[in-house]
Amino acid sequence: MHPSVTLAVFVLAYALIASRRLAVLPIGRPAGALLGAVLMVVTGALAPEEAYAAVDGATLAVLFGAMALSAYVDQSGLFDRLLGLASRVATTPTRLLVVVAIVPGALAAMLLNDAVCLFLTPLVLRLCTRASLPYGPYLVALATSANIGSAATLVGNPQNMLIGSLGGLDFARFFFAVGPAAALCLVLNAALLVVLSRRALPERFESAAEPPHEDTRAGATRFAFVVVTALMAALMLGANLPFAVLGAVLAFVIVDRREPQATFARVDWSLLVFFASLFVVVAGLRTTGYVDAVWAAVAPHVSASDVGGVASFSAAIVVGSNTVSNVPLVLLVAPYVDAMGDPFRTWTLLAWVSTVAGNLTLVGSAANIIVAEQAKHVHELGFWAYARVGALSTLVSVVVGTPLVWWLSG
């Protein structure tokens, strides 16, 4: 098949993915990626066997496991209890903002950031409503902190899961390389939020900030805490990532003693379709030779070994993540990681920068969109209202966090 036809298929799929709902064909991101995958086979860019081989089963297993695990943790009441505890510890609106800027980040390091935002957004809205607080600062805090915190581990977000699978990375080594930068940038992001939101927040609560009900699921909450802690310990000790996450899910299934259909229904199956299709679409694009040509032009200017090369690489990843989205970008960059030398350092830099780049704009990360969509019936989180914080957060994270990741991953 002529490369221009394959490129046209990719452009069509990307237009459907990037726009979320294209006016002429409003089928959404997952269906748009699926259409692109099917067309790659129909047009002859890939044989069916090549399309099947392009799908990374390990990444899909981790993604499914993380979403199912988050659903069980939410059912246990752990999210409610943590946010309730946070609201009692935070004695002023400003302190509550700091808590909302830290706790979701810590949770996202252990559980998928998209799932954390999905389950915590209603709780944050409830807190703000009861305490008569402005929604905007707390929603931005939730989204930006979940993105930054998710960078710390290989189970924090979809692109890190993909990088862990493609690079064969060790969970503990990755955590010790990226975790300190994530922790530092969470604190800096919280400080930035406080400074930028100081005029919007009252000095004290007008009414109770406590969640509207007391959680009575103490046993379930303790079990969820034990399972998540055990999972993190197992991963730090070198357990296989997909099977460790699936094992944690099975622990909940067995203890729950019920068929898991209701919980599995909370898994975002369309996201799994999106990922599987995206693997095929990007594999088709690679057959054109255009990606190799772009890399040949960029390669002399990027590296993981010197200051100028790392700066150029980081800038390219920030731009690329906000142009083609971070997951497709990771798939496109992956074949060239070894050529940059020091693959582990390059993978960790790619994971860090592509994740924090998602904070640049409201549409830069799926987690951001989840927060905005979940909150829209109460508060319209505007593009520029978000960018006012998100752009600065991205700049600080890249400038401060990237050198630290580079140093610790060496």
Image (cartoon, helix red, strand yellow):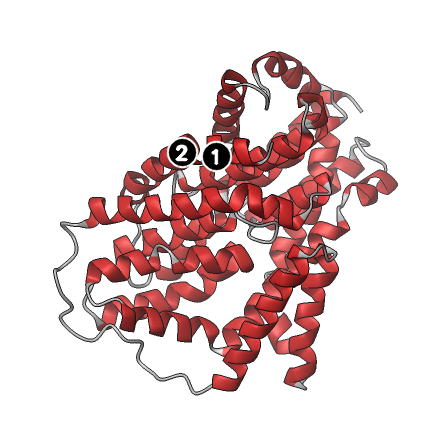
| Left or right, residue 21 beside residue 69 | left
| Left or right, residue 132 beside residue 111 | left
Q: Is residue 36 in view?
A: yes
Identify the residue at image location x=70%, y=48%. Answer: 276
285 and 317: which one is in front? 317
Q: Residues within 10 Å of mark 2 (few under 14, many from 20)?
A: some
Residue 213 in percent (x, y) is at 34, 83
Identify the residue at image location x=76%, y=51%. Answer: 57
- What element does badge 2 sit on? helix
| Left or right, residue 172 beside residue 380 | right
Mark seen at residue 400: 2
**Badges 1 and 2: C-beta atoms under 8 Å apart?**
yes
Residue 350 in percent (x, y) is at 57, 34
Residue 162 in percent (x, y) is at 66, 44
Q: CA distance from mark 1 to mark 2?
A: 7 Å
Q: Residues within 10 Å of mark 1 (few under 14, many from 20)?
A: some
- What element does badge 1 sit on? helix
Identify the residue at image location x=31%, y=76%. Answer: 211
The quadrant where residue 214 appears: bottom left
The quadrant where residue 395 appears: top left
